[in-house]
Image (spheres, rainbow, N blue to C red):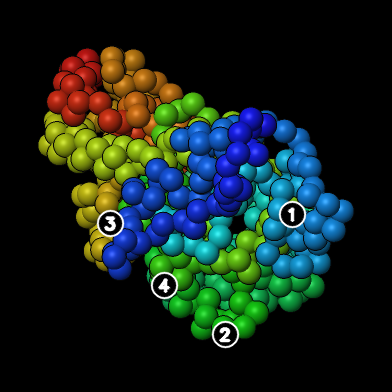
Amino acid sequence: MSDQNDDAVPVTPRRMPKAPIEEIGGRKLKPSTLMMGHGYDPVLSEGSLKPPIFLTSTFAFEDAAAGKRHFEGITGKRPGGADGLVYSRFNGPNQEILEDRLSIWDEAEDALVFSSGMSAIATVLLTNVNQGDVVVHSGPLYAATETLINKILGRFGVTFLDFPAGASPDEVSALLEQAKTQAAENGGKVAIIYLESPANPTNALVDIEGVTNARNTVFGEDGAPPIAIDNTFLGPLWQQPLKHGADIVIYSLTKYVGGHSDLVAGGVLGSKAHMDPIRAIRNTIGTICDPNTAWMLMRSLETLELRMTRAGENAEKVCAFLRDHPKVEGLGYLGFISDASQQDIYDRHCSGAGSTFSVFIKGGEAQAFAFLDALKIAKLAVSLGGTETLASLPAAMTHLSVPDDRRAALGITDNLVRISIGVEDPDDLIADFEQALKTV
Ligand SMILES: *Cc1c(COP(=O)(O)O)cnc(C)c1O
């Protein structure tokens, strides 16, 4: 924008970005503080306190040499991605600021944002998997992830082996040996170890450290397949898998990070070495999130800790009420684990029990339906991690497509109601569950 007084005032570097503030007096600032400004300098955008939404498909180069330099980064001729903005399928200011902020929570070196959790997962798999390869994964996985691995990758000659979420490191080692043999027979390699913990909707935890040790024992440190984990249910506040040996952390940002049930997005975090090839595939296929969604996610990150903390406290109170209720058969809540090895994993990996859990209503589908239909505050909807409390019946909804025998093996019964607790008043929520249980 032109400035009438340009001639009168000495030239000041008004477009020189400020170095990000990450510590004060030797004190490392916490994520909740950094979410208000990290990675953005108002001076660069006319003093606008909040980043503008950059609605553009392409960016003007300073000169031709800069254009060449930027494309060297985009095409991978130089590692580390572009050092400038080029074209909105590759990067944009809103997405880059968001990526800087997102990586803070998991203390990741680098982050990438995507148009959905599934486009993030698909891009990670496309990056790592070739014909003849074997994918080893924990089970159960998010239903669309299972479809992607089992059915879609299967069309391209990729096979898979899976182990139950609670498996011991020895069981995982044995499966990895089997996968190695299978890959050799198919002329491929074990491409990736893909985890989801806690599993949906059973809340079974995977021993990330145990899987890492098994992987290192079976493959050695070099040439080992990366460990990727879908951390949507507990991340980024209550579980940080990079600290337990995982290489790639994946989020559906639609859930807790977005947190208001008003957007769809995904994120992938890890070392630059793991992110660079994933970024290159994202550049090619265009699975990046749009600037408006990136802006919404930055707003959401400012209250992430507040929202998740309150939802976690609410869930604890609601579960304490449900636990002893005569019409409740049991709870799948990480705050009340009954299995010793699951408790051990929880103690090593998790700093909170989350706010998404299962409640088994005494009876079957009819009783569960009666309960769901009687709820007045909790909304009947799939998804989780929003400000509002949601309830659903996986066997009849999200997991309807899962074959009956697999559903039974996973413990997804007709009376399992899944609940995601929001940030409402906890006593109001308890009153709602109490009156709904009366109708059962
Ligand atoms: C919702 C969800 C996904 C998929 O994310 P989208 O944003 O809906 O594409 C993947 N994994 C888990 C655990 C989820 O809850």
The answer for how far apart the CA atoms under marks 2 and 1 are is 27 Å
The answer for how far apart the CA atoms under marks 3 and 2 are is 30 Å
Q: Secondary structure at mark 1?
A: helix
- Residue 406 shows in the view: no
Q: Secondary structure at mark 3?
A: loop
Asked if labels 4 and 3 touch by Cβ distance under 8 angstroms, the answer is no
In percent of the image, x 20 and y 26: which residue is there? Answer: 425
Residue for badge 4: 210
Q: Earlier in the sequence, mark 3 or mark 4?
A: 4
Query: Which amino acid type is shown beneath numbered disc 2?
Result: Gly
In percent of the image, x 42 and y 36: which residue is there? Answer: 300
Asked if labels 3 and 1 touch by Cβ distance under 8 angstroms, the answer is no
Residue for badge 3: 351
Above/below status of 346 relative to 329: below
Residue for badge 2: 220
Q: Horizontal and vertical percent for residue 34?
A: 39, 50
- How many C-alpha atoms fall within 10 Å of the one at disc 2: few (<14), some, or many (≥20)? few
Q: Please identify the quarter of the rendering in which residue 125 is found.
A: bottom right
Q: Please identify the quarter of the rendering in which residue 366 is found.
A: top left
Q: Earlier in the sequence, mark 2 or mark 1?
A: 2
In depth, the one of 20 and 352 nearer the eye is 20
Q: How many marks?
A: 4
Query: Which amino acid type is shown beneath numbered disc 4?
Result: Gly
Label placed on residue 281? 1
Asked if labels 2 and 4 touch by Cβ distance under 8 angstroms, the answer is no
Disc 4 residue: CB within 8 Å of ligand 1: no
Q: Earlier in the sequence, mark 4 or mark 2?
A: 4
The answer for how far apart the CA atoms under marks 1 and 3 are is 34 Å
Query: Which amino acid type is shown beneath numbered disc 1?
Result: Ile
> Residue lying farthest right?
64
The answer for how far apart the CA atoms under marks 1 and 4 are is 30 Å
Q: Secondary structure at mark 4?
A: helix
